Image (cartoon, helix red, strand yellow):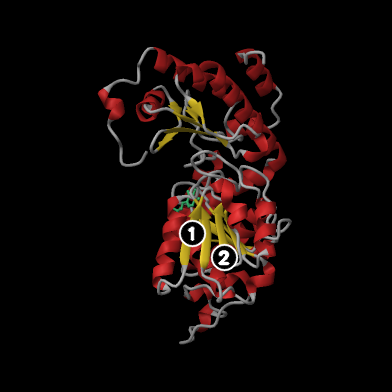
Amino acid sequence: MSPVTRAELEALDARDPLAPFRERFDLPDGVIYLDGNSLGALPRPTAKRVQELVTREWGQDLIRSWNVHGWIDLPRRVGAKIARLIGAAPDEVVVCDSTSINLFKVLAAALRLRPERRVILSDTGNFPTDLYMAQGLVELLGQQHEVRIVDERDVLNAIDDQVAVVMLTQVNYRTGYLHDMAAITRRAHERGALVIWDLAHSAGALPVDLNGCGVDFAVGCGYKYLNGGPGAPAFLFVAKKWQAHVRSPLWGWLGHAEPFAFELTYRPADGIGRFLCGTPPVLSMAALEVGVDFLLEADIEAVRHKSQLLGHHFIALADQELVPFGFEVTSPRDPNRRGSQVSLRHPEGYPMVQALISRGIIGDFRAPDILRFGLAPLYVRYVDVWETVMALREIVETRAWDRPEFRRRAKVT
Ligand SMILES: *Cc1c(COP(=O)(O)O)cnc(C)c1O
């Protein structure tokens, strides 16, 4: 293979149809931001939207805003928009709570649809909070269930007729491995199991087709590729065919059929609304809506195309420049099995990432030895891939990473 050159990457930027989006994010000058898979960048209109919400809607219109400015409809309105990104119908998605809480709600609901089965199947590549929430639910339900965790390549074969629910994150947060949603969902259904997909690293990064795959339940994150801001509310999906048959385990008043009747006894709302719980975080919802609108404006197929090309060039350059220095590429090389990130392994990964950050190239580190680079196509340029790999190579060649301040572990890595 011919070596990757900077000129080649510049040429890709010059004809990139998504390039104009970068200017619409408020990124600091000189920063290369490769952590959009952990906290998406700030869309420029977000500050103005939140400002207007605070000063006019909250400050001036006060409580009337729940009706006049439609605050009360935000969970469904933003949910309906996210639905378009993930192959769902508008009344199958609501925005609420956190990914962890939403996972708990849909897992409890799913288990009750399979009362005779005892296994929740997941994989070692799942994000720990998903596993913890499942383990906590199992304890709450009296330890009658088992959370069975298998290697991600063994999931398909591990789905047997004891499995109640297959609970997976579509894209592995460490390696970027992308599960075959269609095949796993099909197998689960053949064996009588239900599926829950966590879209934390796929919504907004690649086209997802929940209904095309016949998915039962899904959850996802607002602050990663959807650019909703720190702690943005999450979303959940319940397929229409299940909506009348399931209960949320958390019976909040906004999930009641008539919240403002203030009845003493819970009655679930029709449809997806029964998965709402308490009052929506209006400021955060409004910020999330701006991020979602950006993605709706961009063609998600174009987003995926660019993401795959960014990943391809990152890996090719890493092979060329970094593998000789002891790095290993842990992300799948097959672009159809890779999400929107590239991960490298190196035993000194932590201080190396800190050295990169000190130069304005922001990636992150995942224990024990993974350097992780998120490739959010709305604001990452092809040349950023070049700059990153070359900077890392220089850091390694000069041992610039080998300094005590780079070894000090922060609370958040
Ligand atoms: C980021 C992420 C979460 C985050 O959950 P929170 O409740 O928002 O903290 C959950 N699951 C997966 C797979 C993630 O990647």
Which numbered disc covers residue 148?
A: 1
Residue 314: give x, y in percent of width and height: 57, 25
Say left or right for 281 vs 243.
Answer: left
Residue 262: give x, y in percent of width and height: 48, 83
Give the quarter of the image for residue 205: top right
Other-residue count near label 1 (Cα within 10 Å), few / some / many at <14 / 14–19 / ≥20? some
Amino acid type, mark 2: Val
Label 1: element kind: strand
Residue occupying image coordinates x 62% and y 66%: 193
The first of marks 2 and 1 along the sequence is: 1
Depth check, front residue: 357 or 105: 105
Say left or right for 57 vs 85.
Answer: left
Give the residue at mark 2: 163
Residue occupying image coordinates x 50% and y 43%: 173
Q: Is residue 306 above or below residue 159?
A: above
Amino acid type, mark 1: Arg
Note whether ligand 1 is within 8 Å of mark 2.
no
Q: Is residue 299 above or below residue 237?
A: above
Depth check, front residue: 285 or 71: 285
